Amino acid sequence: MRRHIQSRGTQPLAGWPCLGRPGAAAVASPVISRRQVWALVALTLMWGVNWPMMKLSLRELTPMYFRALTMTGGALWLYAFYRARGIRMTPQGPEWRAVALLGLPNMLGWHVMSIFGVKALASGRAAILGFTMPIWTVLIGVGLLGERLTRRVAFAAIAVAVAIALLVSDELGALAGRPVGVLWMGGAAVSWAIGTLMMRRMKHTLPVEALTVWMMIGSAACIWVIAALTEPLPTMRFTPLMWASLAYGVLINYGFAQIIWFGLARNLPPATSAMSVMAVPMIGTLSAPLIVGEWPRWQDGVAMVCVMAAIAAVLLPPRGGLPLAKRPQS
C-alpha cells in the first residue's frame, strides 16, 4: 500500500533551491544524533564540492546540455527511489498548478542562471554569490510583503552589499574579468529567494518529494528545448573525468544529497541547518583549487566571511525565537 504523505504549508529549505522541509507539522529536536551529524557533514560536503564539479563539467559540455542531462538523470533516479518507497508520486488536479508555479523560480530560474554564472566566474565565487539567497528572501519580504526591518536584516543587507561590491570590482579590474557572471548569480539567488517565499505561502497537498521531482522534470524539459535552440549538439565523446563529473551531478548532487536532506529535514534544528548553509560556499571555495585549479583571491575570502555573517544574521534563531527567514507571517 502506498503512503499518501501530505505536506501542507511546507517550509522551504534554506540550503537548496526548490526543496521544502518534509512534514511541516514535525517539531525539530534541539539535539541531533551522531548519525545525523555525520549525515549533515556528508550533505554539506556534497553540496559544496558540487560547485567546482559543475565547473569541471563545463570544460567539455555546454551549460544547458549539462543541466538538461544531469537534471533529467537525477529526476528519474529520485522518481524511481521514492516510488519504490511507496510515496505518492503523481500530482492530481490543482497540484499540477503548484508544480508549474513553484518550478519556475525554484528550479528553472535558479538552474539556468546559476549555470551561466558558474561558466563565467570561478566556481567558489559563484557559490558565494548563490548563497546570498537567504538574505534576498528576507529583503524581498521586507520590501514587498511588509515584513519588519530589524537590525539583523539591516546588517545582513550591508554585509551582502560589501561582498557583491568587492567581487564586482575585482571582476571589473581583472584582465579576463566577467562581471556579467555576478549578474547571473545575483539573478539566480533572487529567483531562488522568490521561489522560497512562494513555497512558504502556497498551500499544497503533494508530497514534497514528488513536488521536487516533478519540478525537476518540468524544468529539465524546458532546458532541453533551450539547449536545442541555442547550443550545438554535444558529441558525447567525453573523457573519463567528465563522465565521473556527470555521474556526480546525477547520483550525488541530484540523488543522494536530496535523499539525505529529506531524511534530516524533519528533525533538524534551525541553528544546525543555518550552520550547514553557511558552510556550503566555504567548501565550494576551498575545494576549487583541488578540483579545477581555481585559487581564491583575497576578495573571495572577505566576501565569503561577509556572506556567512549575513546568513547567520537571518537564519540563526535569536534567543527564544525562530530564525528570521522562517518566522511565521503576521
Image (spheres, rainbow, N blue to C red):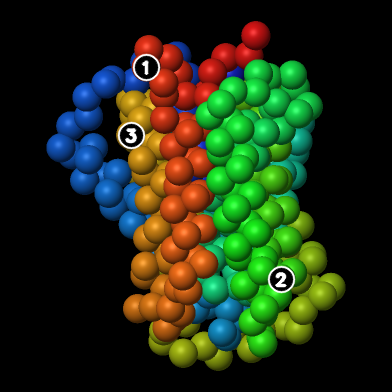
Q: Which residue is mark 2?
A: 179
Which numbered tag is attached to residue 259?
A: none
Q: Residue at x 55, y 73 (%)?
A: 122
Q: Secondary structure at mark 3?
A: helix
Which residue lies most toward the top here? 330
Q: Which residue is mark 3?
A: 272
Amino acid on which disc 2 is placed: Pro
Q: Vertical placement of 119 versus 45: above or below?
A: below
Whichever of labels 2 and 1 marks the residue nearer the N terminus, that label is: 2
Q: Where does the image place residue 274, in percent across and percent down from the top left?
A: 41, 37
Q: CA distance from mark 2 to mark 1?
A: 39 Å
Q: Position of residue 272 (x, y in %)?
A: 33, 34
Under mark 1, the amino acid is Arg
Towards the viewer: 271 or 173: 173
Amino acid under disc 3: Thr
Name the residue rendered at 67%, 33% in the picture.
139
Label 2 secondary element: helix
Q: CA distance from mark 1 to mark 3?
A: 15 Å
Q: Is residue 67 left or right of residue 40?
A: right
Q: Which mark is residue 319?
A: 1
Quarter of the picture containing the C terminus is: top right
The quadrant holding residue 265 is top left
**Nearer mark to the viewer, of 1 and 3:** 1
Which is more toward the observer, 41 or 203? 41
- Residue 193, image quadrant: top right
